[in-house]
Image: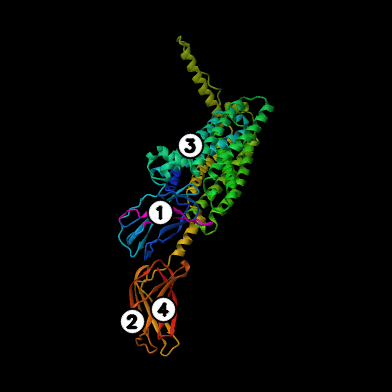
């Protein structure tokens, strides 16, 4: 019994154009949200802390990062209240073990006031990061320091770099997947023009995108000015970095890929002896796999997989992930082109691709689970971070794509039940059309043989194209397969865009580490002065009483301190000596001694008491009631 296609119209050029426009719109929205790139190496701490008020100028300013970074003498700048640089431009490596920490030394004799720390670096996964914060010496003040409002990696250069990054992924998918489709599924495809254009187009796209990324690398990680793309000194500096080395390696591998493509569509396509062609297929498969794995490794060695947890495992897993994506989506694109543009494809070839696509999805799922665990870490990060949310979108798209692919598999199964050769399909077309093939139009002989021959050639070409299209459209199973494969390709384009955005988004595990670090450094700010009341007993005669201490405003920076002593009856009580000390044990700060002045009976005070940073401070009060009778009472208080 002959299967009947669903009553749907065959995709037209208009429907293809609409799909392209929707895809471009979605892609534009995704890439627009991708730049400026989110930070990857994040600032997890600083000394002094953001907003801290220190009593005296520190010898240096130190920054702690979540992962390895590349810095130079101008990466950390400390600007005084007038906007002038106060550091010596001497980068100090303070890294120890897994702690990534760098600093700059400050000049001696710098005045009090608010200082701005502006920093910029390149994270270990190749993305530029930047930021700024302030601290004060003595007391906060107004500042004229200006830092760039645009994040590094943003602006027009960031948009162009993001487009080039996407194009590089797309080119890799078409080049690798198209070649794999020919060698593993449809050897005759090496002689088919549309298939050749897919693979060669992938090579050209990837090469152009890699060159663009190499030129844009200097402004992308630095000034943000497009004109710096042609700065030879900047290009030389880029080549000395890990991302630059990866891009150069990619270009060299693309040279090897060009040789592979020329053999595939040259000697291989022309080879007619099956035994020789089989041997050449094996050789091309081995060589192509090596080149494709090398191209995939240029991403793995320079981006997310190369840093963080288990890089030794993550990098080969990332290579497998990229190869599986390319085999699946690149093969899918090639099949789509064949179904719409090629005169015909053997049903066995479609079945072979269906099996390869299944195993590609299996590898994709396995490697994706590992990558998700590595970059996300916790279930809460899936919904609490931008990376986790994008990952959920990617998973949803993969699920929709797999569901659509299952429909394609059903059409493929139906397709395998009908093995009529193309000649028979042509006969079916003739019967359905109800009329014979149109005869060529006779061109009058005007004596111009060249003109007449050209006209006849155009007529024959048009008739041949129309006949091939009627043969393709005569198969209902092929029509249904074309529609589902077209839908798969549209989803795949958006999926690739989401993947590109993920590579530019801070991993969820890193984001949560930064959030925890910020939470640990933040202390609730009191909405009123610190006010504590403690009983004391020095052990001597009249040694009992109560001490009351007030710290106003009870925040970092300068404070007014008041200490009151009362006897058990609640009356003011004098003592030979009263001392106060502040200790921040978590940061090994203190004790910071304060000796208040005696004001009146039972009252001592001190002004300008400096609390250098927020935290859980221990306030200790020492009361001496005689030459030998003395005690110390203390209490922990959060000071913000």
Numbered badge on residue 193: none
**Sequence order check: which comes first, mark 1 or mark 3?**
3
Q: Circles 4 and 3: CB distance less than 8 Å?
A: no
Q: Circles 1 and 3: CB distance less than 8 Å?
A: no
**Sequence order check: which comes first, mark 4 or mark 3?**
3
Location of residue 158 in the rendering, given as x and y in whole percent from the top left corner: 42, 44
SS of the residue at dot 1? strand
Quarter placement of the N terminus:
top right
Binning the other alpha carbons within 10 Å of mark 4 as few (below 14), some (14 to 19) or many (20 upward) gives many
Location of residue 44 in the rendering, given as x and y in whole percent from the top left corner: 46, 58
State yes or no: residue 85 in magenta.
Answer: yes
Quarter placement of the C terminus:
bottom left
Instruction: Please name which of the two marks, 2 or 3, marks the residue nearer to the observer.
Output: 2
Instruction: Please name which of the two marks, 4 or 1, marks the residue nearer to the observer.
Output: 4
**What segment carries the magenta color?**
82-107
**Sequence order check: which comes first, mark 1 or mark 2?**
1
Q: CA distance from mark 4 to mark 3?
A: 80 Å
* Residue 404 visible in the displayed image: yes
Numbered badge on residue 16: 3
Instruction: Please name which of the two marks, 1 or 2, marks the residue nearer to the observer.
Output: 2
SS of the residue at dot 2? strand
In the image, is residue 454 above or below residue 607?
A: above
**Does 353 sit left or right of 226 as displayed?**
right
**Sequence order check: which comes first, mark 2 or mark 3?**
3
């Amino acid at each position: 019994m002959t299967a009947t296609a669903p009553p749907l119209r065959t995709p037209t050029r208009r429907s293809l154009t609409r799909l392209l426009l929707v895809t471009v719109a979605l892609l534009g929205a995704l890439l627009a949200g991708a730049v400026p790139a989110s930070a990857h190496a994040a600032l997890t701490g600083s000394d002094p802390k953001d907003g801290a008020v220190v009593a005296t100028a520190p010898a240096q300013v130190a920054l702690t990062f979540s992962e390895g970074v590349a810095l130079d003498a101008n990466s950390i700048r400390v600007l005084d209240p007038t906007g002038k640089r106060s550091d010596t431009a001497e980068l100090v490596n303070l890294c120890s073990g897994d702690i990534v920490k760098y600093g700059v030394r400050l000049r001696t004799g710098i005045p009090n006031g608010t200082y701005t720390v502006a920093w910029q670096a390149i994270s270990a996964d190749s993305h530029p990061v930047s930021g700024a914060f302030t601290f004060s010496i003595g007391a906060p003040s107004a500042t004229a320091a200006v830092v760039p409002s645009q994040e590094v990696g943003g602006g027009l250069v960031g948009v162009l770099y993001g487009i080039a990054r996407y194009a590089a992924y797309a080119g890799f998918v078409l080049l690798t997947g198209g070649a794999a489709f020919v060698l593993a599924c449809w050897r005759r495809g090496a002689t088919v023009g549309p298939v050749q254009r897919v693979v060669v187009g992938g090579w050209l796209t990837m090469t152009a995108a890699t060159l663009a990324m190499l030129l844009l690398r200097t402004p992308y990680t630095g000034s943000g000015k497009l004109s710096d793309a042609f700065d030879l000194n900047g290009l030389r500096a880029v080549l000395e970095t890990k991302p630059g080395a990866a891009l150069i390696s990619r270009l060299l591998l693309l040279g090897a890929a060009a040789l592979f493509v020329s053999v595939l569509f040259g000697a291989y396509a022309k080879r007619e002896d099956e035994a020789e062609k089989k041997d050449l297929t094996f050789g091309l498969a081995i060589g192509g796999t090596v080149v494709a794995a090398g191209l995939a490794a240029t991403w793995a060695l320079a981006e997310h997989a190369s840093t963080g947890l288990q890089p030794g495992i993550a990098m080969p897993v990332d290579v497998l992930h990229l190869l599986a994506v390319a085999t699946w989506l690149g093969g899918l694109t090639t099949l789509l082109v064949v179904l719409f543009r090629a005169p015909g494809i053997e049903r066995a070839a479609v079945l072979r691709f269906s099996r390869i696509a299944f195993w590609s999805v299996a590898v994709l799922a396995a490697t994706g689970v590992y990558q998700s665990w590595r970059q996300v870490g916790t279930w809460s990060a899936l919904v609490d971070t931008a990376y986790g949310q994008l990952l959920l979108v990617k998973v949803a798209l993969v699920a929709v794509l797999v569901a659509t692919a299952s429909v394609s598999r059903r059409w493929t199964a139906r397709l395998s039940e009908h093995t009529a050769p193309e000649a028979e399909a042509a006969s079916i077309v003739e019967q359905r059309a109800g009329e014979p093939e149109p005869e060529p139009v006779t061109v009058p002989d005007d004596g111009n043989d060249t003109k007449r021959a050209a006209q006849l050639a155009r007529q024959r070409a048009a008739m041949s194209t129309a006949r091939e299209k009627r043969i393709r459209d005569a198969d209902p199973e092929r029509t249904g397969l074309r529609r589902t494969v077209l839908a798969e390709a549209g989803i795949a384009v958006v999926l690739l865009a989401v993947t590109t955005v993920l590579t530019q988004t801070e991993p969820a595990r890193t984001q949560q580490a930064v959030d925890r670090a910020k939470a640990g450094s933040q202390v609730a700010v009191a909405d009123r002065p610190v006010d504590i009341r403690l009983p004391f007993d020095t052990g001597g005669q009249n040694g009992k009483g109560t001490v009351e201490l007030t710290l106003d405003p009870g925040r970092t920076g300068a404070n007014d301190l008041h200490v009151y002593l009362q006897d058990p009856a609640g009356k003011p009580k004098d003592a030979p000596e009263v001392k106060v000390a502040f200790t921040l044990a978590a940061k090994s700060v203190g004790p910071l001694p304060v000796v208040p002045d005696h004001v009146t009976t039972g009252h001592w005070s001190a002004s300008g008491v400096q609390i250098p940073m927020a935290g859980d401070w221990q306030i200790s009060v020492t009361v001496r009631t005689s030459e030998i009778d003395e005690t110390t009472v203390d209490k922990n208080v959060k000071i913000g």
